[in-house]
Amino acid sequence: MPMVKSHWQLDVYKKAFEVAGKIMEHSRKFPKEETYSLTDQIRRSSRSVCANLAEAWRKRCYEAAFAAKLNDSEGEAAETQVWIEFAVKCGYVKRDVAKELFDTCEEVIRMLVSMRVHSGEWVLPSPNRKK
Protein backbone atom coordinates (compact mmCIF):
# COMPACT_ATOMS: atom_id res chain seq x y z
CA MET A 1 0.00 0.00 0.00
CA PRO A 2 1.57 3.34 -1.03
CA MET A 3 2.13 6.02 1.57
CA VAL A 4 -1.11 7.99 1.67
CA LYS A 5 -1.04 11.24 3.63
CA SER A 6 -4.49 12.58 2.83
CA HIS A 7 -7.94 11.29 1.96
CA TRP A 8 -7.63 13.18 -1.34
CA GLN A 9 -4.97 10.67 -2.41
CA LEU A 10 -7.20 7.63 -1.95
CA ASP A 11 -8.42 6.05 -5.19
CA VAL A 12 -11.81 5.45 -3.59
CA TYR A 13 -12.10 9.15 -2.70
CA LYS A 14 -11.17 10.20 -6.24
CA LYS A 15 -13.72 7.80 -7.72
CA ALA A 16 -16.47 8.89 -5.30
CA PHE A 17 -15.72 12.57 -5.97
CA GLU A 18 -15.84 11.97 -9.72
CA VAL A 19 -19.21 10.21 -9.60
CA ALA A 20 -20.61 12.96 -7.33
CA GLY A 21 -19.57 15.50 -9.96
CA LYS A 22 -21.26 13.52 -12.72
CA ILE A 23 -24.42 13.23 -10.64
CA MET A 24 -24.39 16.99 -10.09
CA GLU A 25 -24.06 17.53 -13.83
CA HIS A 26 -26.91 15.18 -14.73
CA SER A 27 -29.19 16.34 -11.91
CA ARG A 28 -29.12 19.89 -13.29
CA LYS A 29 -31.52 18.60 -15.94
CA PHE A 30 -34.06 17.25 -13.44
CA PRO A 31 -37.43 19.06 -13.41
CA LYS A 32 -37.92 22.01 -11.06
CA GLU A 33 -40.51 20.11 -9.02
CA GLU A 34 -37.75 17.68 -7.98
CA THR A 35 -35.51 20.43 -6.57
CA TYR A 36 -36.30 19.70 -2.92
CA SER A 37 -36.74 15.96 -3.30
CA LEU A 38 -34.86 13.75 -5.75
CA THR A 39 -32.37 16.40 -6.88
CA ASP A 40 -31.46 17.37 -3.32
CA GLN A 41 -31.32 13.76 -2.10
CA ILE A 42 -29.10 12.38 -4.86
CA ARG A 43 -26.69 15.31 -4.60
CA ARG A 44 -26.56 15.07 -0.81
CA SER A 45 -25.95 11.32 -0.65
CA SER A 46 -23.33 11.30 -3.42
CA ARG A 47 -21.40 14.12 -1.75
CA SER A 48 -21.78 12.50 1.64
CA VAL A 49 -19.78 9.49 0.44
CA CYS A 50 -16.75 11.77 0.14
CA ALA A 51 -17.46 13.68 3.35
CA ASN A 52 -17.78 10.50 5.41
CA LEU A 53 -14.62 9.11 3.85
CA ALA A 54 -12.76 12.29 4.82
CA GLU A 55 -14.08 11.94 8.38
CA ALA A 56 -13.05 8.28 8.45
CA TRP A 57 -9.55 9.23 7.38
CA ARG A 58 -9.22 11.68 10.27
CA LYS A 59 -10.47 9.03 12.73
CA ARG A 60 -7.73 6.52 11.98
CA CYS A 61 -6.50 6.77 15.57
CA TYR A 62 -9.40 4.53 16.55
CA GLU A 63 -10.06 1.48 14.41
CA ALA A 64 -13.73 1.19 15.44
CA ALA A 65 -14.44 4.86 14.65
CA PHE A 66 -12.59 4.56 11.35
CA ALA A 67 -14.56 1.46 10.37
CA ALA A 68 -17.86 3.06 11.44
CA LYS A 69 -17.32 6.11 9.22
CA LEU A 70 -16.34 3.86 6.31
CA ASN A 71 -19.61 2.03 6.89
CA ASP A 72 -21.48 5.36 6.83
CA SER A 73 -19.78 6.21 3.53
CA GLU A 74 -20.78 2.83 2.13
CA GLY A 75 -24.38 3.44 3.19
CA GLU A 76 -24.43 6.81 1.41
CA ALA A 77 -23.10 5.20 -1.77
CA ALA A 78 -25.88 2.59 -1.60
CA GLU A 79 -28.45 5.35 -1.03
CA THR A 80 -27.11 7.14 -4.08
CA GLN A 81 -27.74 3.97 -6.10
CA VAL A 82 -31.39 4.01 -4.99
CA TRP A 83 -31.79 7.64 -6.13
CA ILE A 84 -30.19 6.72 -9.46
CA GLU A 85 -32.84 4.01 -9.85
CA PHE A 86 -35.59 6.56 -9.14
CA ALA A 87 -34.07 8.99 -11.66
CA VAL A 88 -34.24 6.30 -14.34
CA LYS A 89 -37.78 5.25 -13.38
CA CYS A 90 -38.91 8.90 -13.63
CA GLY A 91 -37.20 9.29 -17.01
CA TYR A 92 -34.71 11.93 -15.83
CA VAL A 93 -31.57 9.91 -16.63
CA LYS A 94 -30.99 7.58 -19.55
CA ARG A 95 -30.45 3.95 -18.65
CA ASP A 96 -26.90 3.79 -20.07
CA VAL A 97 -25.82 6.87 -18.10
CA ALA A 98 -27.47 5.51 -14.97
CA LYS A 99 -25.72 2.16 -15.39
CA GLU A 100 -22.33 3.89 -15.49
CA LEU A 101 -23.16 5.93 -12.37
CA PHE A 102 -24.60 2.90 -10.57
CA ASP A 103 -21.62 0.70 -11.45
CA THR A 104 -19.17 3.35 -10.28
CA CYS A 105 -21.04 3.56 -6.97
CA GLU A 106 -20.83 -0.23 -6.75
CA GLU A 107 -17.06 -0.05 -7.27
CA VAL A 108 -16.81 2.60 -4.56
CA ILE A 109 -18.79 0.34 -2.24
CA ARG A 110 -16.44 -2.59 -2.92
CA MET A 111 -13.41 -0.40 -2.20
CA LEU A 112 -14.95 0.90 1.05
CA VAL A 113 -15.82 -2.62 2.19
CA SER A 114 -12.27 -3.73 1.51
CA MET A 115 -10.91 -0.82 3.55
CA ARG A 116 -13.31 -1.65 6.39
CA VAL A 117 -12.46 -5.36 6.35
CA HIS A 118 -8.76 -4.48 6.44
CA SER A 119 -9.18 -1.44 8.69
CA GLY A 120 -6.28 -2.50 10.91
CA GLU A 121 -3.90 -1.84 8.02
CA TRP A 122 -5.11 1.76 7.76
CA VAL A 123 -5.19 2.89 11.39
CA LEU A 124 -2.41 5.00 12.82
CA PRO A 125 0.11 3.35 15.11
CA SER A 126 -0.40 3.95 18.81
CA PRO A 127 2.07 3.33 21.58
CA ASN A 128 -0.78 1.75 23.61
CA ARG A 129 -2.07 -0.49 20.81
CA LYS A 130 -1.12 -4.15 20.96
CA LYS A 131 0.02 -5.71 17.70
Image (cartoon, rainbow, N blue to C red):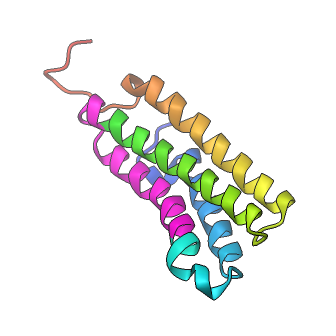
Q: Is residue 107 visible?
A: yes
Where residue 110 sits: x, y (%)? 60, 34
Q: Is residue 76 magenta?
A: no
Where residue 42 sits: x, y (%)? 56, 65
Quadrant for the C terminus, please.
Answer: top left
Which image quarter: residue 38? bottom right
Q: Which residue is drawn at the image coordinates 28% and 30% (left, top)?
A: 64
Vertical comparison of 22 with 76: above or below: below
Q: Which residue is drawn at the image coordinates 45% and 47% (left, top)?
A: 73
Where residue 90 sits: x, y (%)? 73, 68
Q: Main secondary structure of the magenta part?
A: helix
Q: Is residue 6 visible?
A: no
Q: Is residue 62 magenta?
A: yes
* Residue found at the very far left of the displayed protein: 128
Which region of the structure is painted magenta?
A: 41-65
Left or right of 73, for residue 127: left
Vertical comparison of 32 with 17: above or below: below
Where residue 49 sits: x, y (%)? 48, 53
Vertical comparison of 115 with 31: above or below: above
Q: Which residue is drawn at the image coordinates 81% and 61% (left, top)?
A: 97
Q: Residue 38 versus residue 6: which sits nearer the camera?
A: 38
Q: Residue 103 versus residue 30: which sits nearer the camera?
A: 30
* Residue found at the very far top of the displayed protein: 131
Q: Which residue is drawn at the image coordinates 59% and 79% (left, top)?
A: 34
